[in-house]
Image (tube, rainbow, N blue to C red):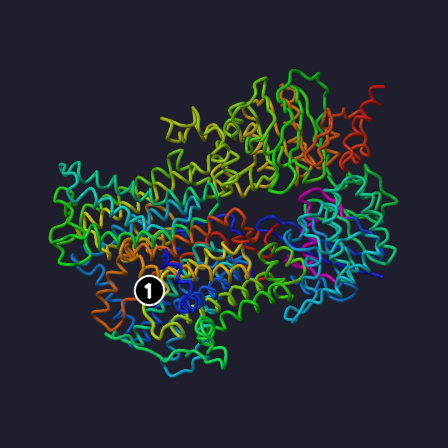
Amino acid sequence: MRLEPRESTSVWLVLAAPILAIGAALMLSSGLVLWTGESITAAYGALLKGAFGSRFAVAETLTRATPLMLTGLAAAVAFRAKFWNIGAEGQLYCGALAATYFGTGLITLHPLLMIPLLFVVGALAGGAALALPVYLKSKLKVDEVVTTLLLNFIILLFVNYLLEGPWRDPMSMGWPQAAPIIDEGVLPRIMAKSRLHLGLIIAVISAVLIWLTMRFTVWGYEIRAVGNNATAATFAGISVNGTVLRVALISGGLAGFAGVTEVAGLKGYLTLDLSPGFGYAGIAVAMLANLHPLGVIVSAIFLAGIYVGADSMSRAVNIPNYIADVLVAASVLCVLVSLMLTQYRVKWR
Amino acid sequence: MIDLFEIFLTAGFWAATIRIACPLILGTIGELICERAGVLNLGIEGIMTVGAMSGWMWVYQGGDLWTGLVFAAFVGALFGLLHSLFTVYLGLSQHVSGIGITMLASSLSFFVFRMMLPSSTTPPKIVPFKPIHVPGLSDLPFFGEALFSHTPMTYLCFAIVPVVIYVLYRTPVGLAVRMAGESPMAIEAQGINVLTVRTGAVAAGSALMAVGGAYLTMSAFDAFYFGMINGRGWICVALVIFASWRPGKALLGALLFAGLDALQVRAQQVAGAFIPYQFFLMLPYVLSIAAMVIMARRARYPKALLVPFRRGERI
Amino acid sequence: MTALKIRGVTKSFGSLVANDNISLSLQKGEVLALLGENGAGKTTLMNILFGHYVADTGDIEVFGNPLPPGATDAAINAGVGMVHQHFTLADNLSVLENIILGTESLFAWKSNTDQARRKLQTLADDFGMQIEPDKWVGELSIGERQRVEIMKALYRDAKILILDEPTAVLTPQEVDHLFETLRSMVARGLSIIFISHKLHEILNISDRVNVLRRGKMVGEIETKKADRNRLAEMMVGREVKRPKVEHITAGAPVVELDNVVLPGAKGHRPVIDGLSLTIHQHEIIGLAGVAGNGQSALADLLSGLRTPASGTVGVAGDTLASFSPQAFINLGIGRIPEDRQEKGVVGDMTVWENLISENLRQAPLWRYRRLIDFHACRAFAKNLIEQFDVRCKSMEMPAKQLSGGNMQKLILARALQNNPRFILANQPVRGLDEGAIAAVHERLLVAKRNGAGILLVSEDLDELFALADRIAVIYHGKISQPISVNAVTVQDLGLMMAGDLAHGLTVQQGAAR
């Protein structure tokens, strides 16, 4: 077997590939459903209904999609420049820490100023979390995959320390959680009788802005050039270290945004279970979208649908909700293969 | 300070170091084999998880401990084969595929565990490997407890290192693996299939990782719980860099690391009053980063690491 | 006795037919030359024979036995050995390890290195080759590496030896030595396929010549009956107008290097070691040297990629204070990198995006210092594509799909569009066919006429003699005085390339007298 590069790829193939891949992932995962003894249609039906079957379900899915869009964008931007930021989880918590620090009474402003302030400090904190990995990569050539991954654990332990120690809310009756965000800083709800908040709009706007940046600006050009061939980019006069730093700040900033939306939008206060792995899931979101910023919007909703749907499915039929993670992982791997097949054709001799 | 120094004089500290080191040794050596053949395996975190789960489950279902290890290795190798299908045969990004394998392996482990054992309040347990009593040696003061109070699996972990060193540096297959990470074209030109060599190395390395995971559920503890691996896989990836891709140094690195980890647990009892315990828990991760920083400049990484080889592609 | 028969081999890559129904045969004890331009399909054919590629159609027989397709091990066992143009050696392993790989059963308990060492020594004695089995390949010179490659084939008892452009990287004296070795092999009954596009070498070493052109076998001739012109005509098949070199009196200095030092890796000698060189307007200086003697480092320096540890670099009279690719672009320095794919283009980006890469960060291609002006960029690219005759289906196609010649034209267009005062041309025609070579050379000569000073780095002495006004030799990071092409011979350069840089002074004094 060998692979031969395609000389041209039709647009339809590129659009159809991820859809076919997700179909394949669903089929592969249905083996697990059969093992549980439930019927495939009942299981996937319950999943679909739980994700999109009602106004409430859609609102829940979109609420869940909000941080996923942001962490997905964080991964997409970074991976475009081949900067392997696997630390969105930690950066998310940094954003949440900053929002908590500034948003729990340190400053009180009108909401029109307070909310932007929280996002700015959140993004700065998220970006700052990448300062060390970027420095080590640029100066000492230390692989950023491992440093960003390990920083996740360090940051989470630090949050744990704050919540059990100096930041613990005295009103929390012993639970490890911080004081609530003041009313001026809370993101307004955008749909009645739901938890859907302003964060969704901010996430979508972020995606569009990132897309515009990648497509129409000199920065975007430089990011794409560095990601595809850093040596040639350097030769043409593009500063690779500068571009990587910029990408890291944007990427960390987006993950920091996700922390702000969760603290100031959904929960209202910082807890240790603020993110059930949104940072890691963001990588899956970005991969499913083939690193396209607008695609991230769709794939984040898809992923959120799987998670929300699987929760309600596991209540309806007897299937552990870990099936959602399996589905996501299988989708990522299938999409990877399918995207490769849009670039290459398989020859059997 | 005096208290801290006394820790080194307790046999318990040295015994704990050896226990903590075992999964790291296997994980690091496994990752090292993959990378020596030119394939970064970020599936390690998930493969250790699936190894921990499957070995344990085998025994829980009535299997024997040793066959349980073989089963864990087999399952690990399967995920290794999946990773090499993506990275070696299809030439996909090793980073992304590895992360995908980690997601798949961990989520499948959790799913299978939940399916077979619906949640209960007390975690189910198995009878793990028991320490073996070595006549004479185990009764020695200090050394008996520090070095000869361990399970057979612990000794196995240490025994694997010289075996791997011998195979890598003294046998034809080891030469082929090293060459696959340095210059795939050189292997191809000598009539050996690069893809097969790389696949074999990744499968073997992944099997070792899985056994490393199984050490946790079958020798160090007796139960499987979620979040058990807790970043150990990633630490192994850092240790490979620290070891500069040498198995001997990997063993030393794992021991050093485990020693510091054992120290931090004991130091908590000494200094826990002034320093919150979370900072002690951070130490392993901080140390891993520090280790990479120290070695990064000197590290001589395999030249063809991360470079896919496509047979018959136009050169 | 027929050693090898290739019958009707066809191989295509996508829409490109690299080999079109090719047949040839090789007798025992014969040197068969495979002549053809770059891209004619010589290497593809040999890669099929050696099992790297699988042919679409056709079959191969070695000593009367059919060879299974796509199996390198089968080819080796049948007695075929190949010395690849780009050596297939691992730098970080020893010579012995590189040679014995694949000679033992993979699952043997132990490598039998003692026996291997003995066999290697016997072979080395037999063929008069020196070899140090425990040295790392990375420490060897290019010539020594080639001997390891040959030894690899001999160690596996090759009866048919393929040499793919073996002389490209050697000094003239090393070439003579190689030819002696080849003759002693033939005397022992080996058969040799010698791939080259250099006519004088083919006339020197071969018994018979097969000529390939654009993937087709266009002719076969006994070397005795051939001469240069006949071979050239068969190889190119069309008249290629070689650009005419005109001598113009050199003008003011454009680039002055004074005692420049670039440090090497830790524990190694500097890659550029006190190098001084002045290049004037209206002149082409050729830089000869065996690969790995500091050419890449010098090219990196003159591309703005490296900063000298000591010494000065002057451009148009001003001493440079900062070194960066952007600074060099702004100074009006055109740079043609050695490796098109690696440094020259960003493969996945479009043709037009690659054409603008050095000019994007200035008016009129950007707007408000942030946005790409697509209209202006496309117009800019369209103009260059026409002016430099870059042939592409559309400027929206990815640059990686361009042919080698057109990719080089793209790079040339980008480097030369602004009438640079200095041009660094590092191996500008490597791997190109005659038509493309002529086009590139023509462009360089036009630039010279317009006043540019040019440093032409090349491993092909013929190219240097054809194009340069003066030639300098680089060895271990030191450079000789540039000598006028009319005063120097290939043999002189060979001595200098082997390390006798002072020989250049003798030559110059001789010329002065």
Question: How busy is the neighbourhood of tag 1: few (under 14 within 10 Å), some, or many (20 plus)?
Answer: few
Instruction: For residue A63, say whether it is visible.
Output: no
Q: Nearer the viewer, residue C6 or C111?
A: C111
Secondary element at tag 1 = loop
Image height of B247 relative to C308, above or below: below
- The residue shown at (84%, 23%) is C510
Q: Position of residue C512 (x, y in %)?
A: 82, 19
In which quarter of the view is residue C226 placed? top right
**Span colored in magenta:** C34-61
Residue that label 1 marks:
B227
Q: Is residue A133 left or right of residue C146?
A: left
Q: Within the magenta stretch, is there residue C55?
A: yes
Q: Is residue C426 left or right of residue C132?
A: left
Q: Amino acid at mark 1?
A: Gly
- The residue shown at (73%, 32%) is C473
- The residue shown at (17%, 36%) is A113
In which quarter of the view is residue C389 placed? top right
